[in-house]
Image (cartoon, rainbow, N blue to C red):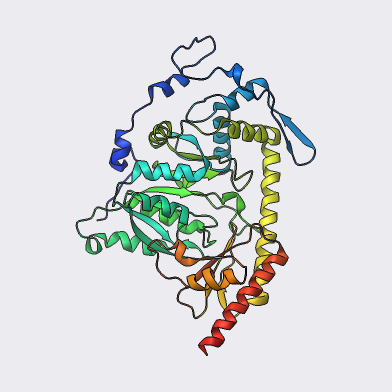
Amino acid sequence: MKANYSAISDYTPFYSKKAKRLAPNPIRSLVSLMKPGTISLGGGAPNQSLFPITTFSFKLGQDVELTLSPTELIDALQYSDTYGIPSLLSALKKLQIKFHKPTVTDWNILITTGSQDGIAKAFDILIDEEDYVIVENPIYSGSLSSMQMLNSRFVSIDTDENGIIPDVLSNTLKNWGETHPNCRLPKVMYVVPTGQNPSGSTLSQDRRKKVYSIAQEYNLIILEDDPYWHLRLLPHQDKDLQSFFSLDVDGRVLRFDSFSKIISSGMRLGWVTGPTPLIEKLQLNQQATCLHVSGLSQVVILKILEHWGENGLASHIQKIQEFYTKQRDACLRACNNHLKGLVEWNVPTAGMFLWFKLSGIEDSEPLIKEKAVAEKVLFLSGKAFDPFGRKSPFVRASYSTATEEEMDEAMKRLSRILKGDQQNIN
């Protein structure tokens, strides 16, 4: 089953049946034709003079007030291009070049309603019913739900504290013909490489290179879901860590970013970066669903980025990293205070989750859903993140919003439950 592949020139073999049926919306096509001096009688945009909102201002912190100009306000309130508002697209391209220094040259960006929407659309254009998809175990439950709706079949690859294990991935694909006779190889791999949700693991630089090499060997598209890229905790363990988008030389990576973790989750603004033909298919999908992302969200984000500049954004990201580092450390102190000998965990170096294993317990779900709820403490059981919904001894804890005192009390309550279970067994 092994083959040698080079740069992708034709994406047709990767497209789902649905993607092959996608066609441009003729009304949407008019948007890009609107230039100064053009008179349009072809579109269906409402008359903007009737929009009741005439001014829009907001504050950053306590001191800085930003006001949208009349042109910015119209951009925010009127229909816009499916790809996104051009000035925001330009700003995002500059950020991708700054943070990822892409090697490929033929790439583009589509702004989406949060990265989750972009991921779901990517599954739509790449996966048919009963296609096999390579996923991590454990897997982010939101993406799991999206693939389950497509009736996908999963190729589950084990992970450890350093992320997905390349040898397991390589052996799985090498032995595909024996383990999956008469089934075609997967064409898509979905991975959360930094601060993985739920495990908190970060794929090491060496493993990223190995995984990308395997993707080249077996002609895989990598879906790089990376909302925690800027939540790498201090001190940085690998300052030279590269994204798959950065490593890509073949045009086989779709990267998903989001402002949810660094500016606002409720504004629902993410973006997909990748090969121009794949981005074009995604925007055709978006034309057929939501037309485009909220203009107000786009303009507000752009206004913030323009106000901050590169230095202001860097300062904000540093502040975020410092905050979540303190949160993680407080969560670890609570575990050390109350859960030693009862659970096992690895220290996350990115993200907002601690993934721990309950000692001597095969299935954490009854304990978490019943006993922990009765004690007024909420976690998620590992079963929710298993691609096949199997029993799991693992538990996910989030340290993003609770105070240090609350985390300490939560771990104390969990300790009480676990010790009570041990006494009942004895």
Residue 221 lies, in percent from the top left, at 37, 47
62 and 169: which one is in front? 62
Q: Position of residue 82 (x, y in %)?
A: 47, 29
Image position of 296 with respect to 363: above or below = above
Which sits in the foreground, 97 or 313? 313
Q: Which residue lies furthest to the front in this view?
A: 374
From this viewpoint, which residue is outermost toward the bottom?
426
Q: In percent of the image, x 50 and y 38: which residue is there?
A: 112
> Residue placed at 33% from the left, 44% from the top?
6
Quadrant in the rendering for residue 181: bottom left
Taking the image as shown, residue 352 lies to the left or right of residue 107, namely right
Q: Which residue is most to the left?
A: 182
User: Can residue 333 be seen from the camera position used here?
Assistant: no
Q: Is residue 44 left or right of residue 22?
A: right
Residue 141 drawn at (x, y percent): 46, 56
Quadrant location of the N terminus? bottom left
Pick the residue in front: 89 or 373.
Answer: 373
Residue 86 at least partly seen:
yes
Q: In which quarter of the image is residue 54?
A: top right
* 74, above or below 207, in the image: above
Residue 7 screen position, x and y as percent: 35, 41
